[in-house]
Image: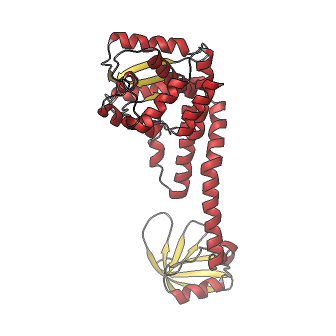
């Protein structure tokens, strides 16, 4: 016999009892008198420094605090640790499991999630894209992030005209030009085809000249073609699907589902992978070629944005404060010499 604490499974009240094992049964005597067959009793996996816990078929349980009594009780009930529990006693097994877990997380993150996100996006109907994009625009408007553009009506009309020139008929897109301080000099594409371009993006392209000439028009057309590529290839939906899967993976590992609630915010700060950026670049190259627009000005723009005022181009530099604002573009669009070189190669082709 040993002292135990009995819980009936219906309340938190604790009953002190004397627990004994004999004749194939567990007997409880004291504040509660019960008798359970040993074969119907389940022993919880033991942990160092914790009570031995017995679960009975009626939902009740008993806890035995005394370590020695707990060991004798487990032996009397024929408890045998599972293979997993036995393996945790070996350092090599724990290290092997850790390596496998890290490898599984890496494979899932860098291959499994992107592949699954692409397949999910391909299966979703266009109505999902419209709903996601409209929700993102509504959220940005409600937050006050999208303020009326401060550009001249002439500039706004010219940029909208460029949009109509490069946008293909089979891709429903619309251009929204706003004074968006949070974006800096940037442009983003939402799943519903809304392309939000900031005033600073236009000012950065125009620079000191103050007019939209052929070079500036080609650069703005290139930026728009790139963003149209994101819409056409459904990159926004893929990013959101991947973020959802990543949040689910994190929640399953850490038990924290708070990241799932933050997913709508992903749409307002889309950051595409280098693979997606390369896909959008190729789409933009094809679209610019179709419209007879050279890709060289876009390559020049990318280099200017990457190197800022250090790249001397007389008559085309923008004020320093615009270069600082352009950092948001560089943080969401991975600029590189390779991308600019690809645009130059495309011009040669």
Disc count in the image?
0
Q: Is residue 316 left or right of residue 296?
A: left
At a point 64% along the width and 57% down the height, the residue shown is 104
User: 128 and 103: which one is in front?
Assistant: 103
- In the displayed structure, 113 sits above or below 4; it is above
Q: Residue 347 at x, y = what percent?
A: 60, 24
User: 61 and 102: which one is in front?
Assistant: 102
Pick the quarter of the image with the N terminus: bottom right
Q: Residue 163 at x, y = what percent?
A: 49, 15
At a point 49% along the width and 76% down the height, the residue shown is 32
Pick the quarter of the image with the C terminus: top right
- In the displayed structure, 222 sits above or below 68; it is above
Q: Is residue 206 visible?
A: yes
Q: Is residue 250 left or right of residue 321?
A: right
* Quarter location, residue 286: top right
Q: Residue 218 at x, y = what percent?
A: 50, 19
At a point 32% along the width and 17% down the height, the residue shown is 151
Q: Is residue 349 left or right of residue 138?
A: right
- In the displayed structure, 207 sits above or below 15; it is above
Q: Is residue 37 visible?
A: no
Task: Give the image's coloring scheme.
Answer: secondary structure
* Quarter location, residue 19: bottom right
Q: Residue 308 at x, y = what percent?
A: 39, 36
């Amino acid at each position: 016999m040993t002292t135990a604490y009995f819980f009936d499974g219906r309340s938190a009240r604790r009953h002190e009892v004397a627990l004994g094992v004999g004749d194939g049964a567990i007997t409880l005597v004291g504040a509660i008198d019960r008798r359970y067959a040993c074969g119907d009793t389940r022993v919880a996996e033991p942990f160092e420094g914790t009570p031995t816990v017995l679960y009975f078929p009626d939902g009740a349980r008993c806890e035995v605090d005394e370590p020695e009594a707990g060991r004798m009780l487990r032996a009397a009930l024929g408890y045998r640790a599972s293979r997993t529990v036995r393996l945790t006693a070996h350092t090599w097994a724990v290290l092997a499991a850790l390596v496998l877990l890290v490898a599984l997380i890496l494979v899932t993150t860098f291959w499994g999630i992107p592949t699954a996100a692409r397949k999910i996006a391909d299966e979703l109907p266009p109505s999902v894209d419209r709903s996601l994009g409209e929700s993102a625009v509504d959220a940005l408007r409600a937050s006050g992030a999208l303020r009326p553009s401060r550009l001249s009506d002439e500039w706004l009309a010219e940029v909208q005209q460029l949009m109509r020139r490069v946008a293909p008929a089979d891709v429903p897109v619309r251009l929204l030009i706003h004074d968006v301080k949070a974006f800096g000099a940037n442009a983003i594409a939402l799943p519903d085809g809304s392309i939000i371009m900031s005033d600073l993006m236009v000012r950065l392209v125009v620079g000191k000249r103050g007019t939209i000439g052929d070079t500036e028009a080609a650069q703005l057309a290139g930026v728009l073609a790139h963003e149209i590529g994101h819409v056409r290839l459904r990159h926004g939906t893929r990013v959101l699907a991947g973020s959802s899967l990543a949040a689910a993976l994190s929640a399953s590992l850490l038990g924290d589902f708070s990241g799932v609630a933050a997913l709508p915010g992903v749409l307002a700060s889309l950051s595409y992978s280098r693979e997606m950026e390369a896909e959008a670049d190729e789409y933009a190259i094809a679209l610019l070629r179709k419209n007879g627009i050279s890709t060289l000005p876009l390559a020049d723009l990318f280099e200017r944005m990457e190197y800022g005022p250090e790249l001397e181009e007389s008559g085309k530099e923008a004020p320093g404060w615009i270069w600082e604002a352009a950092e948001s573009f560089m943080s969401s669009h991975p600029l590189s010499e390779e991308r600019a070189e690809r645009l130059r190669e495309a011009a040669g082709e």
